[in-house]
Image: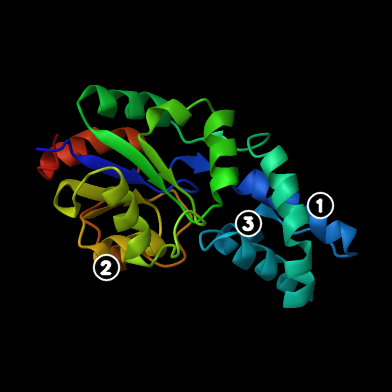
Amino acid sequence: MANFLLVFDLDGTLVDSVPDLCDALNKVLHEHGYGPLSPETVRPMVGDGVAPLVIRGFAARGGGEAEARAALPHYIALYEANATRHSRLYPGVRETLVELRRRGYRTAICTNKLQGATMAVLRGFAIDGLFDGVAGGDRFAVRKPDPGHLTGLVDELGGSVARSTMIGDSEVDAATANAAGVPALLMSYGYARIALAELGARKVLDRFDELPGALDSLGLTP
């Protein structure tokens, strides 16, 4: 039997990335003559991929979609060059990932962040070696909440949805897991835009280091 596969979201689950996302967005807005946005304003814009983020940022300052899309390549370059300057891993992430792999779990990343930016973050925090596979938002023809993003990664790793779970922080992650038929565990500290209690997760956790115990209690074991 294949080892149990834990599929993680990135932003808002493993990494508090809003500081660097906001910084890159504000640099691009400034270049186009717009004022800066606060991290609190940017936070609910995160989770659907880079284009929606930049479009929402420009819209918040009165800019149009065409202008935002024109600025997108420069935003991506700015962000990928500074992806871990101000961001941080959430407490317990590195140690818990090491422990989960020690217990025999396989681990992977499924995120709407672009593949290049995802790898920049993982390498910047030196945790890229803790994952068996990584699927950014441009790896497959679809992205979350389309279940094909998650199931495509599971298939690529030779796993099965019956032996997988999605660990995230938002309605996007919950919808992806529900559509794919895998259990969802959600972190309460992330970037959700609606109440987590409404999302049908198997468990909602307040700390990342609660994950091993939660998996044990649900029978989601290697």
| Frontmost residue, 46 versus 124 | 124
Cα distance between the residues tagged 3 and 1: 17 Å
N-terminal label among 2 and 1 = 1
Task: Give residue 55's quadrant in the image.
Answer: bottom right
- Residue 129 rendering spot, x and y as whole percentages: 43, 26
Name the amino acid, label 2.
Ala
- In this picture, is 194 found above or below 43? below
- In this picture, is 156 found above or below 52? above
| Location of mark 3 (residue) | 40
Residue 77 in the figure: left or right of residue 83: right
- In this picture, is 113 found above or below 217? below
Please state, as top left, top right, bottom left or bottom right, where the N terminus lies in the image.
Answer: top left
Name the amino acid, label 1.
Lys
Q: Is mark 3 on a helix, strand or loop?
A: helix
N-terminal label among 2 and 3 = 3
Disc 3: CA contacts within 10 A as few (<14), some (14-19) or many (>=20)? few
| Location of mark 2 (residue) | 179
Cα distance between the residues tagged 2 and 3: 30 Å
